Image (cartoon, grey):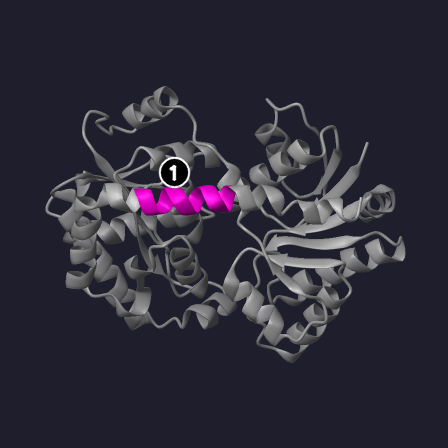
Amino acid sequence: MKKICIWGTSLKKIADEAQVIAFIKIINDRLPGSEITLLSRYGTLMIELFKNEDYKIRTIRTINIPKVIFALYKTDIFIFEGGPFYEQLQQALVCWGLLSISKLFKKPVVAYAATAFHFRTWWGCTIYRNIFNRMDAVTVRESIGKEILNDLKIKNEVELFADPRFILSPLNQDYINEILKKENVDISKPYVCITTRFMHDKIPKWVKKSHHYTEKIVQDSNTCISKIIAYLSEIKQVVLIPMHPEYEEDQQMANTLRKNMKDPSKLILLSKRYRALEILGIINYAEMILASRVGSAVFATVTRTPIIAISYEPRMVDHMKRCGLGNYVFEWRKLNYTELKNSIEEILLGKENIKGILDGNAETFKEKAISNSDVILRFI
């Protein structure tokens, strides 16, 4: 029985939840019966996610240092999964500490389909360069991540992987229809989905810096999106899918978007943050999604749902280009109502063609996401 220890993905975001589900499924498909230890503060939720699966999973809180050390001593491989490599000193030190303990016990360490962010401080560059140089394999799931790590001048080759979430499948239509009916969505009529980014003055400084935040840009952007939602609500049911870490952020964004609507009730904000596979199913049966979150654009690609994307970061542009829809992504600081409206009309009229483009690329991504797991087999 192989022992695998994983750290890196929070469950504060639905997209991260999907990442964990996909990665654990890949491991169990490739290495059946493996004993998986997740270093996570979300132990109860982690177990809940896999209660219907025949997986051998246990969780340890990262703060429980003696148990973490013992788990790293016993594991056959330690995997950084997801996007833990952001420029916050405490986070960087945790990454460095876990890596150092693993290497002390001579364990192989892999960054698996990671997300990399720009490092803008001398200490961030120094610590993370040291971390990546000491790993046995470094893999990322976005082209921009590969560029960032190459710019960091690390010694290891950086491999570009497919996003593991491409292996996921949505829940069945009957189950999703019951959710939609509870949310007052008329399942006999078409609907479009939207996901949002709630930009405000209290977001972390590193987010402000990476998103080039100014209050005026946020106001102009939200006004344009609000007008687009008003337009969409006159021709389709519009369902806002909560995907923020906190549901209250989606509520506040919904209130902002309703300001330009003749009938604000036509924007249907789901009553809670649903589980990842439930959201995947809701997107699956939509005519289109206006996606402001990379995770929702990935979900839409998985389900072959036509996408118009609003890019708040380079990762969104990267994803839309890779899935063949590079002409349908718009930079959030430069939104133009007419351009956005014209593209939505084009997508809705040509949705079967768009689904065809997504279908070919999504199937390729799925096959690659499975074969990428060979990197784990190299070391155990």
Residue 365 in the magenta stretch? The answer is yes
Judging depth in this view, the residue of 340 and 346 nearest the camera is 346
Q: What kind of element bears circle 1? A: helix
Q: Mark yes or no: residue 82 visible.
A: yes
Q: Which residue is mark 1?
A: 303
Query: Left of 202 or right of it: where is 89?
Result: right
> What's drawn in magenta, residue-wise?
356-366
Where residue 4 sits in the image (x, y, percent)?
Answer: 76, 41
Farthest residue, direction bottom = 122
The answer to whether 227 appears left or right of 216 in the picture is: left
For badge 1, the amino acid type reads Thr
Please name the residue shown 26% across and 45% down the image: 353
123 relative position to 361: left or right? right
Q: Nearer the viewer, residue 69 or 308?
A: 308
Residue drawn at (74%, 38%) of the image? 37
The answer to whether residue 215 is left or right of residue 365 is left
Residue 119 lies, with reference to residue 251, above or below; the image says below
| Residue sitting nearer the eye, 145 or 201 | 145
